[in-house]
Image (cartoon, coloured by chain):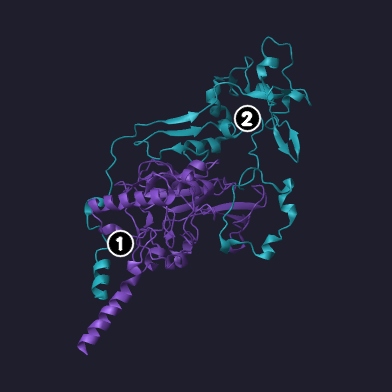
Amino acid sequence: MAAGGATFGAAAVQQALAPLAELSGGFTLDEFLQRHYKQLSREDMEEVLDRLERKTLEEYDREVQIEDIRPIPGVQFGYALNLSLCIGCRKCVEACHKENNHDRATYNSYIRVLEMEKGGNDLEESSVTYDHVVPQRKKFYMPVQCHQCDNPPCVKACITKATWKEADGIVVVDYNWCIGCRYCISACPYEARRFNWTKPEIPAEEINPGQSYLTNRVRPVGVVEKCTFCAHRTRVGRLPACLEACPTGSRVFGNMLDPKSEIRWVLENKRVYILKAELGTLPRFFYFFDE
Amino acid sequence: MAWVLAAVLLVGCDGFTDESREFGPPVTGEPTHSVVIESPQTLGVVDSPLLDVNGTPIGVGCETCHGPTQARSWAATPGEPFHTGVGVTVDGVRKLDHHGELRCDNCHSPDRLTVHLADGTTLNLADTMLLCAQCHGPQYRDYQRGSHGGMTGFWDLRQGPRSRNNCVVCHAPHSPHYEPRMPAPGPRDWYLREKPTAAKEPASEEKSSDLGDGHGN
């Protein structure tokens, strides 16, 4: 009886581990056993980055450099957008699509531009798929992306701690830790998160080779992804890709701790509006108006 | 067994186990890089009705006809074909918009190579922003504070330079209206497909009479 139970137990274990043995298609045991981002030492991280670079070369036939870029001490990022200037041209959407290695088939992007009726702010009545000459006289345009909330509902909703807020205020996702449950997507009041329903398809020559672990590396299928204010750029002092692409200069970005920064001038001198302020999410993304 | 595994996986997720990884290297010191403003150094050219061998219009400088040695009047002649390239399309008609009621010599100096302020102070073409600022003070203030006109490069001038545009790079000085344009493509996610009712937006939406004035508001 005991021997029979042991045999049965071994068979059950073998049965349970069968999916592991069948792991293929680039999903290795190393990947399966990889620890949480915050638990990796510098040496572990080097190995992970090497492995991800090799994987991108295998799957997308493109040599890329993936780095682990950390926050600059004494920097708190803030972003503001001028609703009086925005013309809804979607140049920011396009720039995000290219910079962050999004899936070409869905034309995915972390930014959605809402075309809204002037005289109100009913988000339900807005259009994101408008396809006509802009700007229309009776409309205004409101690009929405991750607000990097200081009280982030998405982080609270995550059951695996795969998403968290970094020291410079950016909410990030460990794309190797996310299990794709999408609770964070439900929790986000700004519809800022995206899910990779399919494996992202990008032609090799279009892949942006300057990548970082937490931001624009090509994400695997089945994980949630989000805007990081282009942390791979902004953490080395550069401006976000969406800001550089804006032809009107609607977008203002900077370090909120620096009293001489552009973002501080806007927050102190312009009429600033916080989207869904009543939810208490404390965003770091602000809208403002000219006189 | 599973509980142990789960405990091992979850413990320590709240902070970095290797604290040296939490921050990158600090950046200190005063800003050392500068802001470069892309400015035109010369007057632009006007597309003439004549085409070159490639079929592109031949550009003619203003001073070719209006130069100090020419007898041609400084005042613009209505319907003058050389001026069809200066202007903006309104309701399908190319109009020569002279920036409100302004005449050429309100801004251009008689030497045609410089411009001048209302008080007569001569400016090089690279400094035309001061000319625009005479009437567009709030825009000039916003530009100086970084909330108009955009920029590329670095937000942190301790780490790299920044490049900005002169007013006339985006606003043609003779027709400063920011022209309406087609947007880049929208999202194509399956869950964003337009509902049947929303797809029946009236076609009159696209009439140019409904176009904005070049500003969001």
The image quadrant where one finds the N terminus of chain A is: bottom left
The residue that disc 2 covers is B173
Q: Secondary structure at mark 2?
A: loop
Rendering coords of residue A202 (x, y %): 49, 50
Q: Determine whether A112 is above or below A6 in the image.
A: above
Residue that badge 1 annotates? A29
The answer for which chain carries disc 1 is: A
**Residue sitting nearer the eye, A240 or B126:** A240
Q: Is residue A189 above or below residue A51?
A: below
Q: Circle 2: is it few (<14), some (14-19), or many (20+) Cα within 10 Å?
A: some
Looking at this rendering, what residue extends furthest in the top direction? B69
Mark 1 surroundings: few (<14), some (14-19) or many (≥20) residues within 10 A: few
Q: CA distance from mark 2 to mark 1?
A: 63 Å
Amino acid of disc 1:
Leu
- As drawn, the residue found furthest toward the right would be B79
Identify the residue shown where x is 47% and y is 55%. Answer: A200
Task: Single out the residue that lies furthest toward the left.
Answer: A2
Please give the chain letter of the residue carrying mark 2. Answer: B
State the image coordinates of residue B119 (x, y, percent, origin top left): 59, 22
Compared with B14, B39 (above or below) is: above
Q: Please tell me whether mark 1 sits on a helix, a strand or a loop.
A: helix
Q: Where does the image place residue A247, in percent across and percent down from the top left?
A: 55, 40
Tint of chain A? purple
Which quarter of the rendered picture does the C terminus of chain A lie within? top right
Chain identifier, colour cyan: B
Which tag is nearer the camera, tag 2 or tag 1?
1
Camera sees residue B46: yes
Q: Mark 2 vs mark 1: same chain?
A: no
